[in-house]
Image (cartoon, rainbow, N blue to C red):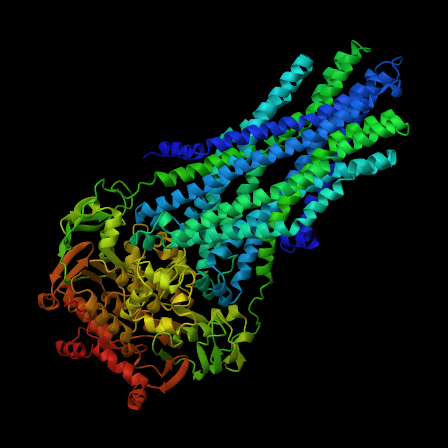
């Protein structure tokens, strides 16, 4: 999907409301035309008065009242038409915004995680929130305004041409200049760049503002003032400067446009005088002259609505580019016919992976040539130094990224051919840093299985050792989680996430440091609870506390993106390789006591000591 | 209204003055062409009334020349106004945003607990955007547009008060409609802004949790809360337009019907002979000029009322009291908890009647089941919240009298959930000490065992960190936060499960780093591995927010209480088993 076709897609969304928008434009134009009537009425009255300037007694009072009434009726009509047109265009606009937002949020959930890791959420938020919002202005206001700004002056000018072509011709000049000024604002290279910068500035201000609020504890601890939180300050200042720069850039065009369009009658004056001077007694010409002077304001009104047309359009076009760019992000591919797997061995077959593409500067293999099988009914542990690629392996299983080389299968089905829906049903996952949603605890657990009953939710909570603390909360399961889980400790949030995964009860369970924050008592309880549950499942576990995975059927040691060793705990220890080193480090770390620079802990630990420590782990 | 301008200017009403003056000047500048147009008409009228004198061409040319010159004056006035208003708007918004950001930093974290973080960012971003728009567009347009009708009214009353009355009679009724619908408008705008903010917050939540959303396959429409918030925003928007539209239209209709009223009255008076023809003509002519600006006034007034709610939201937060305290932190004094009671929500106490003393340069460990209040104690020492009962003192100085910033300058914290800013790794460490040199940063990184992995990155210390540190592993983030704390070198160190997510190879190294960090410091730490705290000078055992035991490791074991129980459980943790 290229970006062009998605721009087309954008217009397709707009065109779904074509009917409403046509109605809106018709009524908007009708309203503008009706708004001319009072001016025309005043002209008719003035004409009547002038004709009887020498003898007021001859004035036709009926005629004056007649035109006065017309002015009023036309006003009522114009306002009703304005309202109908406005509602049509607004309803169309708000529906379009809604659909765009839903589609955008749907889309971003389908693109690979890599996109989210390199895109600040504030930036995406700005696009879905602000860039989309701008479209409202265009659809609801500028589109119908534009239509009436073309049709009304055009019909008026035709009328004026019919009255006196010379004066009408003169009016074309300032109107032409006006449109030219707008085109200049919209089209100039400098302007395009400025509006691009403007978009970046808004996105940056959003991203840093969100960050400032989210990082508030750190902001407070390190005494980071808003002034010294440079990224936010810079973003706010840059936004101001770019905005001022843009306003400066548009200043001449805006001011000229405004002055010229609102003073159209001035341009008619010299021609009027010139033409009058030859025929001083030609009253009918003088009347035409007056008509033109009176009616030009109604020529100005629709044109003045276009004051911000050029800049507004430019802004929307830039915003739409962002929207189109989001749509252009390739989604995780879906198979046309999803294949169902009947067995649940997870296998990696010669998988190599890099986050960046080969031609990128940052290209670096994160995984190379990884092959292993995690069997159903067994626990497979991934261990190794941090940054070695353990979490990447787990993430690949969820297709957060697609592998370019090698293949990952569940049962005998490659995960690419399972379809996201089925894959997510097959695998449940507990992440190291848990994200809880702004909803009740019950709903947060139920995310694992939306059909679950309250009983089932509570059962999962019990197994994950969170039932007890949840019950102790004032509102129990109905407690609303603050965004980010403010009031829950890391361990508590993790246990809720475990409950969520348990409720899902998928055949493959991935635990990425799932109990890192749990205290010993809870960890033990969770382990016991899980032991029941995971009996027939494929369990893939990442843990740094080697003692917790000692019992795994298979331990895979991952180092620098490669499998360094594999086997059971005993086999690996005998091999005396990396695992043995890590085990010793783990044992000595477990002996660590705060505040004592214990020389022992830095020296290789005697085998006897290790044995002793193992026994009390 | 006074209040309104106070609100939209963020309390600095005077800053609006230059643009208001400019708008008045601009408005006055627009009066002259209208007057000149009247003169042209008059010239033409004279040629009708007294055909024998003919059309005064010379006068008309003169008027035209003045008109041309005046175009330049109008241009100057308009661009002056343009300059002043945009400058005022953008500067106000920028300083307002920074000021508000600085203000919320000084509030207790309790304030943040009460509010959705998305809502606060909306204040900083979209609500200020609304105010910006009002100051740059609505206020100056309104002021500038109102000048001509007002001056015309004054002039016309002298010409013929009856006609002037007819022309403007309906205006007060139009204003009355707006005034009466103020409360409806306020309610609808509040609902709309709320819907907008709700959508923004839900969107923020959605994007922050996108990984879980993908993992549970609940993206897009399936994340009902987000879809619903978009839908409600749509409905609130349509409702705002749909309901307020007729009110504004009604006000416009009344206001503009003055023209017809004036025509009616004029024709009667003219026929009755109490109104001269030129005066009637004058009124007709002025009538074509003043109703357009009056409409502009009404439209802008409507929009201003909308942004009043945003301004009010901003001012509400600005009215929140920052944490008080001006005293400095006494050095080398113990930290004393004296009968402290606290709850995040006063109804549910987390800590009850807690008393203990932490001597300087000693290690105090907090132990207890999860939810017993351990983390809360560390947060209270840092004064993230103020307590409800009792007192926390450093020496004899209650910390609620200490300047919170000075207090925090004395404290280093390493927490289990590390927040890194979206900046380079180097700058994230530099947060500990703003003036640190690159050498100092690298030194701290070496001591925190993160220099090695940082150096391995292609861009080294200049590697940008993703939002919230998303591109680094938990252990890596942890070590960066330790480097940060090392660089800060504060006298009180709070450690909350600082080594929970480290891999074994690094754990030893980080433990050494922590030992460096805590040397000669007052240390308060939370650790679930009881073994790591055996050497603490003092162990406080908490349960349900109360202090149940206190002493050294050996003393506590001898007591055979909760500590002994926890200790014995830990000896038995035997790891994961599937079969």
- The answer to whether residue A602 is left or right of residue A29 is left
Taking the image as shown, residue B180 lies to the left or right of residue B358, namely right
Quadrant occupied by the C terminus of chain B: bottom left
Q: Is residue A594 left or right of residue A536?
A: right
Q: Does residue B136 appear in the picture of this structure?
A: yes
Please give the name of the residue rendered at 49% of the width and 67% of the height, measured from the top-left corner.
Answer: B110
For image coordinates 50% across by 82% down, the residue present is B395
Residue B532, above or below A193? below
Name which quarter of the figure residue A305 lies in.
top right
Work out whether residue B17 or residue A520 is closer to the camera in this orientation and state it: A520
Q: Find residue B307 and report its horizontal and vertical position in percent.
A: 60, 49
Q: Residue furthest top?
A: A278
Residue at x 76%, y 32% (from the top left corner) = B259
The percent coordinates of residue A501 (x first, y second) are 27, 61
Farthest residue in the bottom direction?
B558
Q: Is residue A90 above or below residue A272?
A: below
Q: Residue furthest front?
A: A62
Q: Quadrant of residue B278?
A: top right
């Amino acid at each position: 999907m290229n970006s062009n076709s998605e721009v087309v897609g954008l217009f397709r969304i707009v065109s779904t409301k074509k009917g409403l928008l046509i109605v809106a434009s018709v009524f908007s134009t009708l309203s503008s035309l009706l708004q001319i009537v009072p001016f025309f009425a005043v002209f008719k009255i003035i004409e009547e008065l002038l004709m009887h300037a020498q003898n007021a007694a001859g004035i036709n009072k009926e005629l004056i009242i007649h035109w006065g009434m017309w002015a009023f009726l036309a006003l009522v009509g114009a306002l009703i038409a304005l309202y109908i047109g406005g509602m049509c265009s607004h309803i169309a606009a708000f529906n379009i915004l809604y659909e765009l937002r839903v589609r955008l949020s749907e889309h971003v959930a389908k693109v690979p995680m890599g996109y989210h890791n390199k895109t600040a959420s504030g930036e995406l938020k700005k696009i879905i929130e602000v860039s989309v919002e701008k479209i409202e202005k265009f659809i609801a206001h500028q589109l119908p305004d534009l239509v009436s700004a073309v049709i009304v002056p055009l019909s008026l000018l035709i009328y004026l041409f019919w009255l006196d072509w010379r004066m009408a011709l003169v009016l074309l000049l300032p109107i032409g200049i006006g449109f030219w000024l707008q085109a200049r604002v919209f089209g100039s290279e400098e302007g395009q760049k400025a509006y691009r910068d403007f978009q970046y500035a808004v996105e940056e201000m959003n991203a840093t503002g969100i960050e400032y609020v989210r990082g508030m504890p750190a902001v407070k601890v390190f005494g980071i003032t808003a002034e010294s939180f440079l990224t936010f300050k810079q973003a706010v200042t840059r936004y101001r400067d770019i905005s001022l720069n843009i306003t400066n850039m548009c200043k001449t065009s805006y001011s000229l446009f405004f002055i010229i369009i609102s003073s159209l009658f001035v341009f008619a004056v010299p021609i009027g005088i010139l033409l009058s001077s030859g025929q001083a007694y030609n009253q009918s010409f003088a009347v035409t002259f007056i008509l033109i002077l009176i009616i030009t304001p109604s020529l100005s009104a629709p044109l003045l609505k276009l004051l911000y047309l050029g800049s507004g359009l430019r802004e929307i076009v830039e915003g739409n580019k962002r929207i189109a760019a989001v749509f252009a992000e390739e989604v995780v591919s879906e198979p046309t016919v999803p294949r169902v797997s009947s067995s649940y061995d997870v296998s990696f077959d010669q998988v190599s992976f890099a986050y960046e593409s080969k031609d990128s500067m940052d290209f670096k293999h994160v995984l190379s040539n990884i092959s292993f099988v995690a069997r159903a009914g067994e626990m497979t542990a991934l261990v190794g130094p941090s940054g070695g690629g353990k979490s990447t392996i787990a993430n690949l299983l969820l297709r957060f990224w697609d592998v370019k080389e090698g293949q990952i299968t569940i049962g005998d089905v490659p995960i690419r051919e399972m379809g996201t829906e089925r894959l997510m049903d097959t695998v449940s996952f507990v992440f190291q840093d848990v994200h809880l949603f702004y909803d009740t605890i019950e709903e947060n657990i139920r995310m694992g299985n939306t059909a679950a009953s309250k009983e089932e939710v509570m059962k999962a909570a019990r197994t994950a050792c969170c039932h007890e603390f949840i019950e102790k909360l004032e509102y129990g399961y109905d407690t609303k989680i603050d965004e980010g889980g403010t009031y829950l400790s890391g361990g508590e949030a993790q246990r809720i996430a475990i409950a969520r995964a348990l409720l899902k009860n998928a055949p493959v369970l991935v635990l990425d440091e799932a109990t890192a924050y749990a205290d010993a008592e809870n960890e033990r309880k969770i382990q016991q609870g899980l032991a029941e549950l995971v009996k027939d499942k494929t369990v893939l576990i990442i843990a740094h506390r080697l003692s917790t995975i000692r019992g795994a059927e298979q331990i895979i040691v991952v180092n620098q993106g490669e499998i360094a060793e594999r086997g059971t705990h005993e086999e690996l220890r005998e091999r005396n390789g990396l695992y043995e080193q890590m085990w010793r480090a783990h044992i000595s770390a477990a002996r660590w006591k705060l505040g004592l620079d214990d020389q022992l802990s830095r020296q290789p630990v005697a085998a006897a000591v290790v044995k002793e420590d193992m026994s009390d782990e | 209204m006074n209040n309104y301008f106070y609100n939209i200017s963020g309390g600095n009403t005077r800053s609006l003055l230059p643009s208001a003056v400019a708008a008045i000047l601009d408005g006055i500048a627009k009066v002259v062409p209208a007057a000149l147009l009247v003169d042209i008409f008059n010239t033409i009228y004279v040629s009708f009334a007294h055909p024998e004198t003919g059309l005064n061409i010379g006068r008309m040319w003169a008027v035209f020349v003045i008109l041309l010159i005046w175009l330049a004056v109008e241009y100057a006035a308009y661009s002056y106004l343009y300059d002043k208003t945009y400058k005022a708007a953008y500067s106000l918004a920028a300083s307002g945003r920074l000021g508000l950001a600085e203000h919320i930093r000084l509030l207790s974290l309790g304030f943040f607990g009460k509010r959705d973080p998305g809502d606060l960012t909306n204040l900083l971003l979209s609500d200020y955007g609304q105010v910006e728009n009002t100051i740059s567009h609505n206020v100056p347009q309104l002021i500038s547009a109102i000048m001509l009708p007002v001056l015309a009214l004054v002039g016309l009353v002298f010409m013929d008060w009856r006609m002037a009355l007819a022309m403007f009679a309906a205006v007060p009724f139009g204003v009355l409609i707006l005034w009466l619908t103020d409360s409806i408008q306020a309610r609808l705008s509040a609902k709309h802004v709320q819907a907008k903010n709700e959508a923004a917050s839900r969107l923020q939540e959605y994007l922050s949790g996108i990984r879980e959303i993908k993992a549970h396959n609940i993206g897009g429409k399936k994340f009902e809360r987000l879809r619903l918030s978009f839908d409600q925003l749509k409905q609130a928007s349509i409702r705002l337009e749909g309901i307020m539209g007729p009110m504004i239209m009604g006000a416009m209709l009344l206001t503009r019907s003055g023209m017809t009223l004036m025509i009616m009255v004029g024709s009667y008076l003219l026929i009755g002979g109490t109104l001269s023809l030129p005066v009637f003509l004058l009124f007709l002519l002025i009538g074509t000029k003043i109703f357009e600006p009056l409409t502009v006034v009404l439209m802008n007034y409507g929009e201003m009322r909308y942004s009043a709610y945003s301004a009010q939201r901003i001012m509400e937060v600005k009215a929140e009291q920052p944490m008080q305290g001006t005293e400095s932190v006494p050095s080398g004094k113990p930290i004393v908890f004296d009968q402290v009671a606290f709850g995040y929500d006063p109804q549910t106490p987390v800590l009850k009647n807690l008393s203990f003393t932490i001597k300087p340069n000693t290690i105090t460990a907090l132990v207890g089941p999860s939810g017993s209040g351990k983390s809360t104690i560390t947060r209270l020492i840092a004064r993230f919240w103020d307590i409800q009962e009792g007192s926390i003192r450093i020496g004899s100085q209650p910390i609620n009298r200490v300047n919170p910033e000075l207090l925090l300058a004395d404290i280093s914290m390493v927490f289990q959930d590390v927040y890194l800013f979206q900046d380079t790794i180097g700058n994230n460490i530099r947060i500990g000490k703003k003036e640190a040199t690159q050498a100092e940063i690298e030194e701290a990184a070496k001591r925190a065992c993160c220099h090695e992995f940082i150096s391995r990155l292609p861009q080294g210390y200049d590697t940008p960190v993703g939002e919230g540190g998303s591109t680094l592993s938990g252990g890596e983030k942890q070590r960066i936060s330790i480097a940060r704390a090392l660089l800060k070198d504060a006298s009180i160190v709070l450690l909350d499960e600082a080594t929970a997510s480290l891999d074994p190879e690094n754990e030893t190294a980080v433990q050494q780093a922590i030992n460096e960090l805590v040397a000669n410091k007052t240390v308060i730490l939370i650790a679930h591995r009881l073994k790591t705290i055996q050497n603490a000078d003092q162990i406080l055992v908490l349960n349900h927010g109360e202090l149940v035991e206190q002493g050294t490791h050996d003393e506590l074991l001898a007591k055979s209480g909760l500590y002994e129980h926890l200790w014995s459980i830990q000896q038995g943790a035997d790891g994961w088993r599937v079969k």
